Image: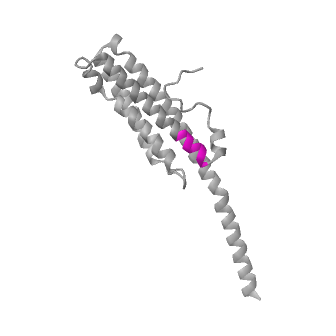
């Protein structure tokens, strides 16, 4: 008599534990979604800061611009570390990979050596290179957002529209 009752209690306990784990899974996905969204928003702002710093090359000169790039680079490196340490739920690995790829392109552009060498490089060619790199970062950012939407449609609805519009003008 005690054995069936103990088995019943054990099965009820396991069922409740399974429900608890299942109810925590959406919480984990929701937390990841919020953390990824916040990272995308910060990366978007850093891309804008990077563009503004690069635009100051003519007005401020290469040394001042290089110093500004170093500050943006440090912030991008911190953002990359934060994004890299996010643990994506199963199926959301591409979100992290694409987000890291976007930040990596921005890190390449934030190299102070780029503007220090600007004197020796054709300005038109440098401008074209910078534009291409920003477009590559934006493509990776859009792919990260698409991967986030694909992971869970509810997550995409919670994401602020346009949170990852690298280089897009505010409307």
Image quadrant where residue 19 sits: bottom right
Percent position of residue 15, x then y: 70, 69
Q: Is residue 171 above or below residue 17?
A: above
Rendered residue at 67%/45% (across/down): 154
Judge whether residue 145 is colored magenta: yes
Numbered range of the magenta stretch: 144-151
Percent position of residue 28, x then y: 59, 52
Q: Is residue 157 above or below residue 54?
A: below
Image quadrant where residue 57 sits: top left
- Count the numbered circles shown: 0
Compare residues 11 and 127 and report the one nearer the observer. 127
Rendered residue at 66%/60% (across/down): 22
Q: Quadrant of the C terminus?
A: top right
Q: Is residue 1 above or below residue 139?
A: below
* In-image side of 47 versus 151 (left or right): left
Rendered residue at 30%/26% (across/down): 112
């Amino acid at each position: 008599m005690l054995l069936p009752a103990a088995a019943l209690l054990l099965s009820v306990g396991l069922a409740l534990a399974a429900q608890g784990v299942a109810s925590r899974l959406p919480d984990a996905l929701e937390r990841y979604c919020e953390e990824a969204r916040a990272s995308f928003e910060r990366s978007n702002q850093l891309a804008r800061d990077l563009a503004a710093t690069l635009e100051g090359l003519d007005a401020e000169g290469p040394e001042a611009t290089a110093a500004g790039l170093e500050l943006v680079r440090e912030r991008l490196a911190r953002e990359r570390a934060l994004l890299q340490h996010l643990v994506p739920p199963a199926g959301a690995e591409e979100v992290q990979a694409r987000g890291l790829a976007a930040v990596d392109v921005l890190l390449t552009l934030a190299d102070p050596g780029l503007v220090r060498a600007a004197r020796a490089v054709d300005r038109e060619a440098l401008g074209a290179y910078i534009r291409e790199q920003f477009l590559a970062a934006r493509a990776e950012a859009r792919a990260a957002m698409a991967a986030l939407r694909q992971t869970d449609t509810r997550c995409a609805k919670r994401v602020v529209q346009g949170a990852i519009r690298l280089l897009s003008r505010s409307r």
